[in-house]
Amino acid sequence: MAILLYRLGRFSFRRRGRVVAMWLVLLALLGSAAAAFSGPTSNSFSIPGTESQKAMDSLAEEFPEASGATGTIVVAAPEGERLTPAAVGPVTKEAADVPGVVGAVDPFEAKSVSQDGRYALVQVQFDSKADEVTDDQRAAYEQAGADADGLRVEHGGEVMQAVPEIGSTEAIGVGVAALVLVLTFGSLVAAGMTLLNALVGVGAGIAGLFALSGVVEMNSTAPILALMLGLAVGIDYSLFITSRYRQHLSQGMEPEDAAGRATGTAGSAVVFAGATVVIALAGLAVAGVPFLTVMGLAAAGTVALAVLVALTLLPAVLGFAGRRVLPRRRAGREGAETPEAAENRLGFRWGRAVAKVRVPLLVVAALGLGALASPVTDMRLALPDAGTAAEGSAAREAYDLTTEGFGEGFNGRLAVVVSGDDAQATGAATKQTAALVAKTDGVLTVAPPQTSKDGTTALLGVIPKTGPSAAETEETVHSIRDRVATVEGATVSLTGATALGIDVSEKLADALPVYLVLVAGLSVLLLMLVFRSILVPLKAALGFLLTVGATFGITVAIFQQGHLAGLVGVDTPGPLVSFLPILLIGILFGLAMDYEVFLVSRMREDFVHGVDARRAVVSGVGHNARVVSAAAVIMTSVFGGFVLMEDPIIKSVGFALAIGVVVDAFVVRMALVPAVMHLLGRAAWWLPRPLQRALPNLDVEGERLQQKLPEQRSEGELTNV
């Protein structure tokens, strides 16, 4: 591996003009494809095979006029006054005239007026799904009732689900990353070059995703997740290789050979770090959730491109930069850095300090992470609803006004679909179903049935007593399903956005333990291949579990329990978005293995070259502490930029990833890992002989490369390594 990448690095360095041109052409082609073939992204979360999704599919086929997106216009009179049909009528008429609306129900006819007469709900039915409603239709819907004199009119419902957009907040994270790179390298050339490489990779990845969005149904979160990871790992991978290149230059090596060696050694670590991220993200498919699979594959593709950019475009750009990647005070020097100067670096001092206090450090860090993980026992999962939307948004205003006038349950409407072979069977089953549902604990009321044109399908609207994300509503959904299972003569299913969210959350919760075991086991196997050790992989897996536990605990404490929620812009605490835990495990696994590989590969590199095991730990920390710290700060900054977005899903994902990186890099990898490695000593690298023979030697640390290069100094010989 190291020898192959060494050749690739030297080739890219020499043919730098062609390599750069190739990437620019590829970027242009992908950009053109994105402009020509991109399609709309979806904001829906569904899982084929669940009862709610089956009911939605059946409704679309048998009762299409009731299967489109719904909207709810909330009308409120001034305090102390009552609404009248004459006052609300124009609002209903304007809603009915919105393009794509098949009907708007007068609240006085539907009896959807509050007991005090001050509030009314105008139910609006569209002919297409929420994802298919155009911006013009949505704008026209929001204008319905805007001129109602003396009335407060708010617009909510499925149709108001906004697709999150990539905006200026992400630039803040990139700006911080650029500053960290300048401070780390002490060179504008090195910082700019590293950032440019990452932007090329993420640009190609995002363009490729949008090019595929015309043929693949893509959730609106997928491109943003891909952008998050593409930027973070793209900068980090370039940072690691550039740092090794600068180190070789400072030792007096020629730029071309330095680029080749940096790609062969640090590049090998990048390949395996990237592979772990890609495998973990692609592994999200085991959950059996289509939208999650697409999100994982989209992010995995962007990470794979980041690896290719780091291994090819980066050495080419290094060819143009030469020695200018060094700080100006050192760019013209040819001599190597003295050992005394290296030993005085902060990283070496930290490595020696960890060695001295390794046992107390292990105890304090483990107990601290355990305490941070304690809120996990209270974790609840749900799909987000308008109740957790940003204060002041249209969806949130409508939600709050509905709650004020009718109670939270009116925001969590359920729908019971009754399908029979003929109109008579459907009618009888509908009456029986309505009676059973009305007597169910947690149900406030059951609306009169709507019947399809042929009478074989009926739709019952059910209003629970509690809100869509309340634990009591989940119990109500299960109780209704248990009761209607006894109905004969027709198929009865419970659906609606609330029921769909509950089904998605339960499916993902069931998949979470399986996925956690999968990625933990995968980390052991991969690191066993990389480091040819038993204890190092086990230590890495345990460290990853500590990271995950602490990250979940902090996220629950802030986003669900509301502690310090205002600091991250959370207006209303609530359950975590249902796919956050499994997504977080996948991404953090990859990133944790990144730091593990980068840090420990240097320890093994020194160990296999004859350095004492414990001195190798100090050396690994000393050489990589600054780079790993800079990489962690960069990742945290990139992820943290997404916390400033209003969308609660993106905000929670960005926050959890930022916290996870901080915990893993600074507590687990920079403190616990070297402490454990000091305790283990030579035993850390023990591998049973049968496994030594069975496992391939991937040479990530470049041992064979180190053996060959000193014997092959001539230009012709080096090309044949």
Image: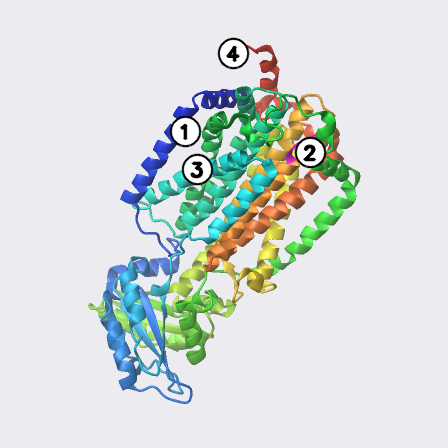
Query: Amino acid under label 2?
Result: Gly
Q: Earlier in the sequence, mark 2 or mark 4?
A: 2
- Residue at 65 percent across and 57 percent down: it is 374
Q: Nearer the observer, disc 2 or disc 1? A: 1
Name the element at disc 1: helix
Q: Earlier in the sequence, mark 1 or mark 3?
A: 1
- The residue to which callout 4 is attached is 715
Q: Earlier in the sequence, mark 4 or mark 3?
A: 3
Q: Is residue 73 above or below residue 10?
A: below
Q: Is residue 358 above or below residue 686?
A: below
Task: Check contact, mark 1 vs mark 4: CB within 8 A.
Answer: no
- The residue to which callout 2 is attached is 622
- The residue to which callout 3 is attached is 201
- The residue to which callout 1 is attached is 20
Q: What are the residue bounds of the magenta stretch?
A: 619-624
Query: Amino acid under label 3?
Result: Gly
Estimate the x, y position of residue 274 in percent, counting from the top left: 51, 35
Name the element at disc 4: helix
Task: Check contact, mark 2 vs mark 4: CB within 8 A.
Answer: no
In the current view of this chain or complex, which residue is farthest to the left?
A: 454
Query: Amino acid under label 4?
Result: Glu
Q: Earlier in the sequence, mark 2 or mark 3?
A: 3
